[in-house]
Image (cartoon, helix red, strand yellow):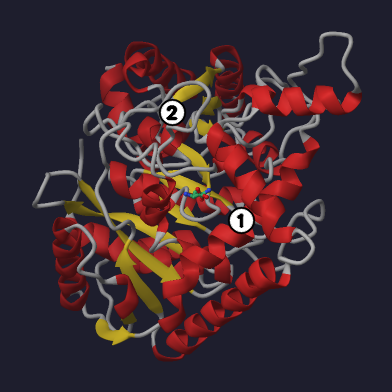
Amino acid sequence: MSADITRLDAATLASRIHGGELSSVEVTRAHLDRIAEVDGEYNAFLHVASEQALAAAAEVDRALGAGEKPASALAGVPLALKDVFTTTDMPTTCASKILEGWVSPYDATLTTKLREAGIPILGKTNMDEFAMGSSTENSAYGPTRNPWDTSRIPGGSGGGSAAALASYQAPLAIGTDTGGSIRQPAAVTATVGTKPTYGTVSRYGLVACASSLDQGGPCGRTVLDTALLHEVIAGHDPRDSTSVKAPVRPVVEAARQGAAGDLKGVKVGVVKELHSDSYQPGVIASFDAAVKTLTELGAEVVEVSCPHFEYALASYYLILPSEVSSNLARFDAMRYGMRVDDGTMSAEQVMAATRAAGFGKEVKRRIMIGTYALSAGYYDAYYGQALKVRTLIAQDFDKAYEQVDVLVSPTSPFTPWKLGEKVDDPLAMYLSDLCTLPTNLAGHCAMSVPSGLSEDDGLPVGLQIMAPALADERLYRVGAAFEAARGPVLV
Ligand SMILES: NC(=O)C[C@H](N)C(=O)O
C-alpha cells in the first residue's frame, strides 16, 4: 500500500487527500518509510524531519476533517527541501562543514509559504556545498547517487532533491538554480525542474551563492506537479529587494492547456549554438527526436542564432565567483556554525583556520578566483568584461524572442557520468552547465523536462525549454504538451 502511495504524482495525492480517500498523515508516513528504507542507497537527504512532517500532516487532516478548505492545491502533499533554505525546526547546512548543525533563527519566505500551504517538509536534501558544483560530489556529507544507476552522479547542485523525486522518496521538491542546479539534475534523473524568472521566487532566507543569479524553483515528476508547486512558492516579497512586483504567472492553467496536446500557433526556436557535435551523440539524437515531436504537435520550429552564448561559460565563471567571494565572507567564525580556536589565536587566525577547515576545495577555488577578479587593477579586465558579455547574451535572447515564443536545447550536453569521473577536472564539470547558464545570466526562465533515454547508454536526457522574463507559463504549456506526447520516463 505505502509503495503504491509513493508512486503517485502530487496532483493525484492532493485530490485523494482533499477528497478524503487518503489522509496526509498516511501519505507523509509512506514517504518517511520509503526514506528509511532506501535512502541509505542514495544519500538524498541530509536531515529527515519525521516528527515535524507528521505534525504538519496531522494539522492538514484536522483542518480538512473540520470542513475547512484546503490551504492550497497541494495541501497535505509532502516535499523535500534543498538544504539551502533556512528552517527554524531543522538544521540548514548548505552541505558545508562550516554550517554543521546550524539552525536558523528564522524561516525563509519560501519555507513559510510551504508551511502556510499545508505542505509537510520531509527533510533537507543534499547538494554541492553552497550550491557550487554539478554532481553533488562537493557535499561535505558524501555524494548523492543517481537512482537510475547508483554508480553515477545525480547532477548538481540540487542532486539530493532530484534523486529524492526519482527514487520516490518525495513527490515534490525544491531546488535552487544559479547556473543550472535545478535543470541539470532534473535532466540526468528524468524528472522535471523549473528555474523561474529571476526575482519571482523570494530569496529571503535562501543562503546566497551568487545573488544576481540565484533563484529558487519547483521540482516534480510531472509538469503539472511542478506548476502547482510553482504557484505556491512564487510571489512578491518585500523582504527581498530584488523581488519582482508582478502577479504570479498562470502556470497551472498553462500546464493543463498544454496537456491537451496542441501547440498550434507556438513558435519554437532551436538555438544553433547549443546544438553541437561535441555533445554526447545520444543526447543530440534524443533532442532531435523531441524537436520532431514538437513539430508534430503543431509548433512551428525554426533555427535561431545566439552568437554570444559561446561566452556564457567564461562570463558566468567570473561573475559567479566574484559574488561568491563577497557573499561567503560572512562565514567568519564569529556569527555562524563552526569555529576553530585553540584559545591562543587572534581573531584573524581564528577566521583563517575556520575557513580553511570549514570550506571544501571547490568553494575555496571560487572564493580565490572571485577575489582575484574583483581586485584593483583586474576588476575591469575580468569582472567588468564579464558584465558586458552578460548584456550581450541578454540582447541575443531579446532578438531571438522577437521571432519565437520559446527556445529549446538539450538541458545538458551529457547523460549522468560516473561518480569520481570529473572531480579532479573542474572545467569538465563546468561544461555540463553550457546550455543552462545563458538563462541565469539574462534573468529569464527555463524548464527541463525528460526527453527520453539516450540511445548510447540508456540514461536520461533532458529537453530544455526557455522563455523570456515573466513568461514562465510558456514553459509549462510546451513542457506539458511534450510530456503528454512522449509518455512517462520512469526508473
Ligand atoms: N549553482 C548552480 O546552479 C550550479 C552550477 N553548476 C555551479 O556550479 O555554479
Q: Nearer the viewer, residue 163 or 347?
A: 347
Q: Position of residue 436 (x, y in %)?
A: 43, 61
Count of number-bearing discs: 2
Vertically, is 383 above or below 309? Answer: above
Q: Nearer the viewer, residue 355 or 375?
A: 375
Direction from residue 162 to residue 201 in the image, left or right? right
Vertically, is 234 above or below 188? Answer: below
Sooner in the amino-acid sequence: mark 1 or mark 2: 2
Vertically, is 282 above or below 155? Answer: below
Asked where in the image residue 266 lies, by quadrant, the reply is: bottom left
Tell me the crowding category of disc 2: few under 14, some 14 to 19, or many 20 or more residues within 10 angstroms, Cα based: few
Q: Nearer the viewer, residue 149 or 235?
A: 149
Tell me the crowding category of disc 1: few under 14, some 14 to 19, or many 20 or more residues within 10 angstroms, Cα based: many
The residue that disc 2 covers is 20
Q: Position of residue 17 (x, y in %)?
A: 44, 31
On-image quarter of the C terminus: top left
Q: Position of residue 440 (x, y in %)?
A: 54, 63
Q: Residue furthest top?
A: 343
The residue that disc 1 covers is 320
Residue depicted at 37% across the width and 66% down the height: 465
Q: Amino acid at mark 1?
A: Leu
Residue depicted at 30% across the width and 79% down the height: 272
Q: Secondary structure at mark 2?
A: loop
Whether the residue carrying mark 2 lies under 8 Å from ligand 1 is answered with no
Q: Amino acid at mark 2?
A: Gly
Residue depicted at 44% across the width and 74% down the height: 309
Q: Residue furthest front?
A: 377
Q: Nearer the viewer, residue 151 or 424?
A: 424
Whether the residue carrying mark 1 lies under 8 Å from ligand 1 is answered with yes
Which disc is residue 300 wearing? none
Please state which of the two labelled residues, at mark 1 or mark 2, is closer to the viewer: 1
